[in-house]
Amino acid sequence: MQSAEPDTEGTRQGPMASLVNDPATLDVYLLIHALASSRTPYDARYQSSAWAIMAGFTRFSAMTGAKSKWSRSVTKLTKMGLIRREGSGRSVRYYLLHESGSGDPYTRPKTVDDDRWFSLPHTYWLDGWDQTLGAPEKMMLMIALSSKPTFELPYNRAPIWYGISESTAKRGLTRLAERKPAALLRYQRWEPDAASRTLWRTITSYRLIGKWSARSRAAVMRKQRSDEPVKFRENKEALDLALESALSPPGTLVIPKETKIVERIEGLIDRDRQKELR
């Protein structure tokens, strides 16, 4: 979310700031990242129809339009130096590149010594947050996940720290706190301030709550699951994408004994096939 060093204007914005008005491309990047970042060579390859379904692009358009939308987002990410695309047609493979947009190879962080990094819980897709959050909320959720468990973010510092406007920071944080279920707890405290007309200043702090809290995310990473080898049905490509991105913990090749996500994806595929036949 931030560059390691300030730019010539003194800001530390990362490439993600340019996606604040393009939530579709942001979600494409997050989805590719979820699939490709678990193991070397940090790549993912699936049919474009499977990508379009999982990105939610088929909810409001036919498959042809959804695949075109996916292609446009991938092209933008490629130009930003965040991914590398190889192949064409049904055999396209995406490789992750360094998050700075430098074009350098991607390296998976493992410890706090590997610069600042954060994990995005699978609840983002399983509970439909990717489809219900607006662009400001998505951007501020990423920033919150990359911050300390309790953090402060004065709106007027957002342009310098993250390259986003004050209004975007305010809308995003406010909506995350006021939506149901809320993702963020917002609270205030007052401290003496001799420079203030009232001799006091208000400090607003934030903390992620529910499934987004630091404790919940840590518990998911530690959770022991009863697993079995991956088994696919006829729709292998889409099921592979859906199951691996939504259920598999990083670095594994197994999935939990759950059928809910399988039924959900098969239903989406059948629905889209029926649309094409009409």
Image: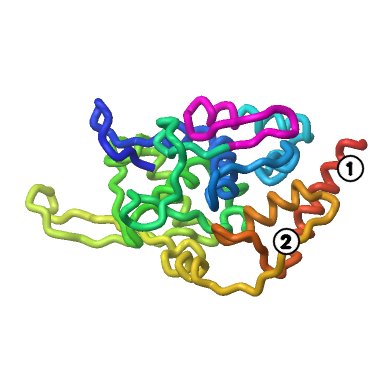
Q: Is residue 225 above or below residue 170?
A: below
- Residue 58: x percent and y percent? 74, 40
Let me know if residue 28 appears in the view: yes
Residue 270 counted in the magenta span? no
The furthest residue to the left: 194
- Residue 243: x percent and y percent? 69, 56
Quick one: label 2 or label 1, which is nearer the N terminus? 2
| Amino acid type, label 2 | Val
Which residue is labeled 2 in the image?
230
Residue neighbourhood size for the residue with mark 1, other residues' Cα within 10 Å, grouped as few (<14), some (14–19), many (≥20): few
Residue extent of the magenta highlight? 73-94
Left or right of 202? Residue 220 is right
Let me know if residue 60 appears in the view: no
Could you say which quadrant of the image residue 191 lies in?
Answer: bottom left
| Amino acid type, label 1 | Gln
Could you say which quadrant of the image residue 254 lies in?
Answer: bottom right
User: Between tags 2 and 1, which lies in front?
Assistant: 2
